Amino acid sequence: MNKKRNALGRGLSAILRNPQADITNSENSASNKSVSNTSEILIENIQINPFQPRKEFNKENLYQLSESIRNLGIIQPITVRKLGYDKFQLISGERRFRASKLLKLKKIPAYIRIANDQQMLEMALVENIQRQNLNPIEVALSFKRLIDECNLTQEACGERLGKNRSTVTNFLRLLKLPAEIQDGLQKEQISIGHARALVSLNDDQKKINIFHDIVANGYSVREVEQIVKDFSDTNYQRISKKSPIKIKEPIPFSYQKILHDLSKNLNQEIIFNRNKKGHGKLVIPFKNDNELEEIFNKINK
């Protein structure tokens, strides 16, 4: 068991470069003849990796990659494992594989490796995390699968990827955000800095309210950190939701903070409408005369 763990502990690059895991290596070849490090494999004999964490592939990017392959060829071979006679399964390089199929190529250069299911999963996850164009939620989900399905600690997960344990922890915390905010992070409506500031709040509805105001008013990360600090122990009422008129110009943060402070002091919802020229209304609703009198008393203080 320790021997297996040590092998996995070397990470993706070490596993893929290990001659003992190379089925094209002369010592592992049935013919005992020296062979090339790569082989040309029929694309129709290659199965998609069932452990691939990424399910969506941008079509435009695939077409761009296919044009690059048409002009320059495949510079980096894909990596596969052998399932049986002339049957292979992808370990890494699915974008190159898909782009080659778009070109209707018959063969593709490949490294052939030996890997069991757990190694396949770990290789796919590690490669997925190391991709530079993943959004933070995709990275966090890959971290979680690596920990849960490969039975790793956060520290061991970080070691696999050359990252600090705190980095792994911070990404995993993003999965505690409500689904609506996670979706906004994936769509780049907010940044990872905004998301990390919201994670520290305990109230999900408060997180969602602030999230919508970030999207509506373009708050910076520093401004959101200040909002989180100011409203950590009190309710935060979403102002962007209350405005019956769509605000085309972002409300300055200083105004937004004043509105929230006023709402907090009066314990009342504040409706704020403002157009491009700065004209608008500030409305404080009330249900009855007693509530109105209470508002007046608080203002006079």
Image: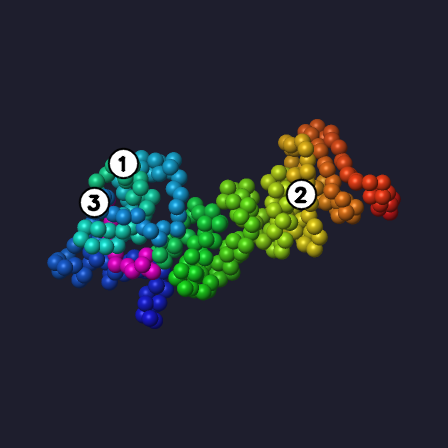
Give the residue type at disc 3: Leu
Give the residue type at disc 2: Arg
Query: With respect to residue 129, does 279 lie above or below?
Result: above
Query: With respect to residue 199, does 256 lie above or below?
Result: above
Q: Residues within 10 Å of mark 3 (few under 14, many from 20)?
A: some
Element on which disc 1 rests: loop
Residue highlighted by disc 3: 42
Which percent across, then down, holds residue 251? 67, 37
Q: Earlier in the sequence, mark 1 or mark 3?
A: 3
Instruction: Give the CA distance from mark 2 to mark 1.
Output: 51 Å
**Stretch in magenta:** 108-120
Residue highlighted by disc 2: 238
- The answer to whether mark 1 and mark 3 are in CB contact below 8 A is no
User: Which image quarter: residue 272?
Assistant: top right
Instruction: Give the CA distance from mark 2 to mark 3.
Output: 57 Å
Give the residue type at disc 1: Leu
Check if residue 119 falls in the magenta segment. yes
> Looking at the image, which is closer to me, 227 or 281?
281
- Residue at screen point 79% across, 40% down: 286
User: Which image quarter: residue 240?
Assistant: top right
Q: Nearer the viewer, mark 2 or mark 1?
A: 2
Residue highlighted by disc 1: 103
